[in-house]
C-alpha cells in the first residue's frame, strides 16, 4: 500500500507519494512509480501467456506501422535536409503500437524477463513470447519492404528516388560501415548502440504506463523514442525493415552482412538493454532489491 496524503496547499486533484526519501507530486491522471513497476510485471505476464497466433498477427501489424513511419521519417529528412525532424516524427510508430495494444519485440524484452525473474512466467513462456514476436516481425518487415520498393521506386522504375537513396545509405552504414571496422570493433560498437537503443525504446513502452490519459501517454512515449532515433542507435525491428528494403533498392549488402554484422548482435544488445537497464533497473530503483531475489523481509 502506497503512503499517499494530500499536499498542503495543493488542490484535491493532486496528491503526493512519500517514496522513501523522495516526495512525488501526483495528479488524478498520473501513476506512481511503484504502480508502474508492478504494471510492468503484470504486462510481462500478459505478453508471455498470449496465444502464438495472436503474438504473430500483432507483431506483423506493428511491423507495418514501423515500416510506414520509418518511410515517413526518411521522406521528412530528404525533403527538408534536417535529420532531427525525422527523429521528431518517428515516435508516431511506438505511440500507435502501444495505444492499439500491438506487439513489439523490443518492448517485450523489457517486460517478460522481469516477469520471469519474479517467477510469474516460465522459461518456455518467455521463449515463446520472444520467438513468435520475432517471427511476426520478420514476416511483417519483409512484406513492408516489398511495399516500400513498389511505392517508392514505382515498381523498380526509379531506384534513384530520394527516399530510396536515403535508405540505401542508412543500411550501408548499419552493415558495411561496421564491417569496415573489423569483427572486434564493429561488433562491439553495434552491440553497444543496440543496448542503448533498447534501453530507451523499452523505456518508451514503460512511459506509456505513466499516465491514464491518451494525451499524457503520447507525450510520455514520445520523449525517449525521439532521443534514440536522433542519436542513430540500433533497433532490431527497424533494421528488419530498413536493411532488406535497402537491398531491394540496390544496396550491395549480403544476407550475411545483414544478419552477422547487424541483426544478430542488435537483437542481443536490445535484449540486454531492455531486460537489465529498464526491467531490472526500474525494479531495483523502486523496490530496492533485485527482481530475482526475495523481499528483504522474506529472506
Image (cartoon, rainbow, N blue to C red):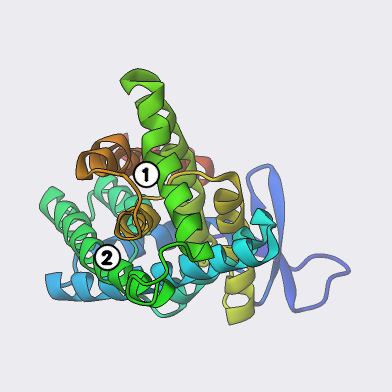
Examine the image and state in which quarter residue 14 appears: bottom right
Camera-nearest residue between 23 and 198: 198
- Residue 156 in the image: above or below residue 241: below
- Location of residue 125 in the rendering, given as x and y in whole percent from the top left corner: 15, 57
- Residue drawn at 13 percent across, 69 percent down: 52
Which one is nearer the viewer's eye here, 117 or 81? 81
Spot occupied by residue 66 in the image (x, y as percentages of width and height): 41, 67
Q: Secondary structure at mark 2?
A: helix
Quarter holding the C terminus is top left
Q: As drawn, which residue projects farthest toward the right?
A: 9
Marking on residue 179: none
Which class describes the residues within 10 Å of circle 1: few (<14), some (14-19), or many (20+)?
A: many
Q: Which residue is mark 2?
A: 47
Say if mark 1 contacts mark 2, CB within 8 Å. no
Q: Residues within 10 Å of mark 2 (few under 14, many from 20)?
A: many
Q: Is residue 73 visible?
A: yes
- Percent position (x, y) of residue 142? 25, 65
Question: Where does label 1 land, which residue?
Answer: 270
Residue 204 in the image: x percent, y percent? 52, 58
For image coordinates 47% across by 48% down, the residue present is: 169
Instruction: Give the left or right position of residue 36, taking residue 264 as reference.
Output: right
State the residue at coordinates (66%, 77%): 28
In the picture provided, is 178 more to the left or to the right than 91?
A: left
292 vs 95, left or right, is left
Q: CA distance from mark 1 to mark 2?
A: 18 Å
Up-down relation of residue 171 to residue 9 (above or below): above
* Circle nearer the N terminus (1, 2): 2
Does residue 160 sit above or below 19 in this rendering? below
- Helix, strand or loop at label 1? It is helix
Q: Nearer the viewer, residue 290 or 142?
A: 142
Q: Residue furthest front?
A: 157
Amino acid at each position: 500500500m502506497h503512503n499517499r496524503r494530500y499536499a498542503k496547499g495543493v488542490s484535491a486533484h493532486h496528491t503526493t507519494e512519500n517514496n522513501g526519501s523522495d516526495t512525488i507530486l501526483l495528479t488524478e491522471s498520473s501513476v506512481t512509480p511503484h504502480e508502474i513497476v508492478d504494471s510492468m510485471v503484470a504486462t510481462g505476464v500478459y505478453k508471455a501467456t498470449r496465444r502464438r497466433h495472436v503474438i504473430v498477427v500483432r507483431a506483423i501489424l506493428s511491423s507495418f506501422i514501423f515500416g510506414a513511419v520509418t518511410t515517413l521519417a526518411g521522406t521528412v529528412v530528404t525533403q527538408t535536409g534536417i535529420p532531427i525532424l525525422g527523429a521528431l516524427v518517428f515516435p508516431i510508430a511506438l505511440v500507435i503500437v502501444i495505444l492499439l495494444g500491438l506487439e513489439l519485440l523490443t518492448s517485450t524484452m523489457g517486460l517478460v524477463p522481469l516477469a520471469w525473474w519474479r517467477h510469474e512466467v516460465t522459461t518456455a513462456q518467455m521463449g515463446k513470447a520472444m520467438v513468435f514476436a520475432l517471427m511476426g516481425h520478420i514476416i511483417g518487415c519483409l512484406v513492408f519492404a516489398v511495399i516500400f520498393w513498389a511505392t517508392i521506386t514505382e515498381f523498380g522504375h526509379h531506384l534513384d528516388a530520394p527516399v530510396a537513396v536515403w535508405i540505401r545509405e542508412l543500411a550501408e552504414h548499419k552493415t558495411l560501415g561496421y564491417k569496415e571496422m573489423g569483427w572486434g570493433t564493429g561488433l562491439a560498437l553495434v552491440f553497444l548502440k543496440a543496448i542503448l537503443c533498447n534501453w530507451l525504446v523499452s523505456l518508451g513502452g514503460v512511459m506509456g504506463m505513466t499516465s491514464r490519459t491518451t494525451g499524457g501517454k503520447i507525450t510520455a512515449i514520445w520523449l525517449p523514442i525521439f532521443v534514440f532515433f536522433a542519436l542513430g542507435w540500433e533497433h532490431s525491428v527497424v533494421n528488419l525493415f530498413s536493411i532488406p528494403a535497402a537491398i531491394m533498392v540496390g544496396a550491395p549488402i549480403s544476407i550475411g552482412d545483414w544478419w552477422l554484422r547487424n541483426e544478430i548482435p542488435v537483437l542481443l544488445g536490445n535484449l540486454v538493454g531492455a531486460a537489465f537497464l529498464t526491467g531490472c533497473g526500474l525494479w531495483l530503483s523502486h523496490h530496492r532489491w533485485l527482481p530475482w531475489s526475495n523481499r528483504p523481509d522474506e529472506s
